[in-house]
Image: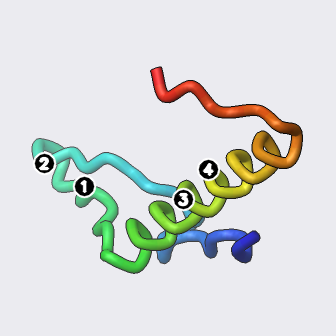
Amino acid sequence: MKDIIAPIDSEDGLFHDGDPAGGVKGTVVYARELNAMQGAVIDTQTEQKNILAAAGMQPNPA
């Protein structure tokens, strides 16, 4: 299992919507955050498929 994804670089570690009317900028999303998210999802899916395979079960893609 991969390490826990690090919080993003914001004051509270969370993503925020911007508000152009109020001059509030939204969170800038960098490739490192998206790649970490994608890697974590793939890692979790792979682990779940391995658990099912060990139990003799086959996932249903539908």
Q: Position of residue 6 (x, y in %)?
A: 62, 75
Q: Amino acid at mark 1?
A: Val
**How crowded is the residue under tag 1: few (<14 C-alpha within 10 Å), some, or many (20+)?**
few
Q: Amino acid at mark 3?
A: Ile
Of the image marks 1 and 4, the number of the one nearer the N terminus: 1
Q: Are marks 1 and 2 in contact (CB under 8 Å)?
A: yes
Of the image marks 3 and 1, the number of the one nearer the N terminus: 1
Q: Position of residue 8 (x, y in %)?
A: 51, 71
Q: Amino acid at mark 4?
A: Gln
**Structural distance between the alpha carbons of marks 4 and 3:** 5 Å
Residue carrying label 1? 24
Residue carrying label 2? 20
Q: Are marks 3 and 1 in contact (CB under 8 Å)?
A: no
**Structural distance between the alpha carbons of marks 1 and 2:** 6 Å
Q: Quarter of the image for the N terminus: give it.
A: bottom right
SS at badge 2: helix
52 or 15: nearer the viewer: 52
SS at badge 1: loop
Residue carrying label 4? 45
7 sits left or right of 49 in the view: left
**How crowded is the residue under tag 3: few (<14 C-alpha within 10 Å), some, or many (20+)?**
few
Q: Which mark is residue 44?
A: none
> Disc 3 or disc 2, which is closer to the eye?
3
**Structural distance between the alpha carbons of marks 1 and 4:** 36 Å
SS at badge 4: helix
40 or 34: nearer the viewer: 40
Q: Position of residue 50 (x, y in %)?
A: 75, 53
Q: Are marks 4 and 3 in contact (CB under 8 Å)?
A: yes
- Quadrant position of residue 58: top right
SS at badge 3: helix
